[in-house]
Each structure stands twice: as C-alpha cells, then as structure tokens.
Amino acid sequence: MKSASQLSIYIHIPFCVSKCRYCDFYSTKYDSSLAELYIDALAVEWDLVCREKQLTEPQIVTIYFGGGTPSLLPLKQWQKIGRSLLSRFNRDSLIEFSVECNPDSFSAELASLLLQLGVNRVTFGIQSLCDKELRAAGRVHNVQTALNVLHQQYLKNFRSVGVDLIYGLPGQSIDSLSMTLQNLTASEYVNHCSAYELTIAESTAFGRHRRIFPFPDEDSVYEMTTVVIDYLLQEGFEQYEISNFARKNHRSLHNETYWDHRNYIGLGCAAHSYLHPYRWANVSDFGVYLEKISGNKLPRSFSEFIDTETLAKEMLFLGLRRSDGIDTEVFEKRTGKEFSALVDMKKIEAFISKGWLQYRNSRYLVTPSGLLFADTMARELF
C-alpha cells in the first residue's frame, strides 16, 4: 500500500464496570495490570499489521476509541496510549478523533487530557434519562449524573458531542422517551444523536430472561421510532442514516468510513478491519489476544475476500440506510461493473414511484420516508 493511502483506525477498549443487559459487544471487567498489558499489545498489533499489509506511514483521517468503556481508563493509562500508540500514527491528515464515554467515568481532568491528545469528538452512552429504564438496562449511571455531564462547560472545547439513545427498553413509554429527548437536546453542546431500537441478542441478559421484562409491544416501538425522528428533525438535526442524526457539519465521519466502504484498521479484541478487497476480525477473547500478540502473531479469528457480488450487495444495503443514498459513479468504480448490470432497475424505478428514492446527479438519494422502508427495499433487491 502506498504511503499516501488514507486510513481510519478503530481501537477497542474492552473494559467495563459491569455488563449491560442489552450488550452483546465483547467486554471484560477492568483490571489495571491487564490494561497495561493490553495497551502495550495494541501498539505491537499496529506494527504487525503495518508489516503484513506493507503500510508505510498511512495518513490517518479518523480515529475512534470504542468499547467497552474507554473513559474507564485512568489518566495515566491514557497518557501511555498517547506515548505508545498514538505516537505511531501519521496524524497530519487527521480530521476526527472520537472517544466513547460513560457519564459515570467522565471528568474535567479526563476531558482536558483527551483534548491534549488531539481528541475533538466525544460520545456519551446515555441510553435513557429515566432512572427506572436505566436500572432495567443495567446501566451504572443515573439521570442526574448524565445531566450533570451534558451541561459541563468544558464540552464546548470539543468540536462535536454525541449521545447514544436506546428505545424499546423495558417499561419505556412514549412519554418517558419524549422526556429523554427533550432533556438530551436541552444541552447546548449536544450536536449528534445515535438512536437505536433495542435489539435483543440471545447471548445477553435480556435474551436469556426475555419473559420477565416488560418490553413495549411492536406497535409502541414503531410509534417510538416516529417520535424520535419527528422530534430530532424539529430540533434542527438531519437524519443522515437510519439511526443517526446530526446538526449541520456534525456527522460522524468515522461511521461514514464504514458505510462508504473505505479502508479501516481495527485494533484490539474483537475489532474488525477492511482493506479492499479483504475483511478480517480479531479474536473475542482477552487471553488469546494477548497470547497471540506476545508471540508476534496477528490475533485473527477470520479473514475473507470480498468479491464483486458481495461488495455490490453491501454497498446497496448500506446506501439504502443513508440519506446520501448510492452514488452510482462510485459504485461502478468500486465494482468495475455498470450499476444497471448488477441491480434490478425495475425495482429501483418502483421505489422512486413510491417516493422512497430520488435520482439526482448520478446518485440515488433516500427520502425521509424511504429511510423507514430501507429494510423493505433491501429485501426486495436481494
């Protein structure tokens, strides 16, 4: 790969205080000595990936620390990340540097250090601003802690501040969801909201004990979807992806890397990577990850070649979930095939007739109503 190539970097910090009842991401309890070893391993993994893929000082355009709970790391370990890992990155072209945070583990001191490290975007896992719903979800923080963080003046020093919201939680109502939305947007610093309908994985506490939790019915959840969309649009946010809303110039550029099928490297347990035309993932086991790295081996759980048909389907599926839709020129450049040769154009025309798509300047844009039927369009096309 040429030295001028651009990359995004995802770093998985797997440590949590406890496991939330809805979460199926890989995580483990925080241990200081293990965290030290893990930070060292991240730097080694980066060197191993660069060697294998012949990456010569690639230009990093976005960095994203996710988890887990990255904000759980103490200041000294963030300083170590700066010395041992971030110092390895060519950040001359860096546009966005995001860190996921929880309200209970965020502080003015951490904010100051993150800014010194170059972080310009933080996102908070709020999920709800109703204490009963937070307890049901197994969250550690309460409403007051979340509100206190969202109104701290030091947040103005970050270019963007995002919040995560889940709807469809046990005991949640339209009224409680509306109150959560109102309180979230009352913060002058919040300019991005990721709002996800609760999905219940069988491996989670919600999945194992589904019958004992009072989940809203399907009709109520659909109404919640429309409440979220209508309220955030009314408050000046744009819905640029099915579950993501942003004020002007505050989209998540890192997430758009995934949706645009641009190259990214994932470091850490369970992290995924994509360097066209290959995709791979790391092992979801802390001990195995450290063992592999200590032996100077990449901790892969799988690797696959993305053929033209798979790439086309993924570009269509992800494009239908975004207001920007599908750029046919980019599609044809990436796949090497004409758009009409890989896609059923009669169905595309039908979607336009229904008001779900619009065609403009070689791009099929997804309308607001089309975003509600993105899964329907995908099913019909595939």
Image (cartoon, helix red, strand yellow):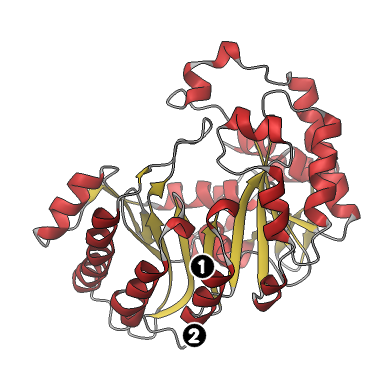
Q: Nearer the viewer, residue 346 or 306?
A: 306
- Which residue is the extreme one toward the bottom? 92
Q: Nearer the viewer, residue 63 or 351?
A: 63
What numbered label is drawn on residue 93? 2
Q: Nearer the viewer, residue 302 or 289?
A: 289
Residue 120: x, y in percent?
58, 75
Q: Quadrant of the N terminus?
A: bottom left
- Which residue is the extreme one toward the top? 211
Residue 262: x, y in percent?
48, 65
- Give the total number of marks visible in the rendering: 2
Mark with earlier residue (2, 1): 2
- Which residue is the extreme one toward the left? 295
Residue 176: x, y in percent?
81, 34
Residue lying at 41% horizontally and 63% vertically, measured from the top left: 74
Give the number of the mark in front: 2 or 1. Answer: 2
In 3D space, how far apart are the residues under numbered discs 2 and 1 (Cα atoms)? 24 Å
The kind of residue tagged 2 is Ser
Residue lying at 86% horizontally and 32% vertically, measured from the top left: 175
The kind of residue tagged 1 is Lys
Residue 193: x, y in percent?
71, 54
Q: Which residue is mark 1?
A: 333
Q: Quadrant of the C terminus?
A: top right
Task: Name the secondary structure under disc 1.
Answer: helix
Q: Is residue 234 placed above or below 97 in the rendered structure?
A: above
Task: Say whether marks 2 and 1 touch (CB < 8 Å).
Answer: no
Q: Is residue 260 placed above or below 212 in the rendered structure?
A: below
Residue lying at 56% horizontally and 79% vertically, measured from the top left: 95
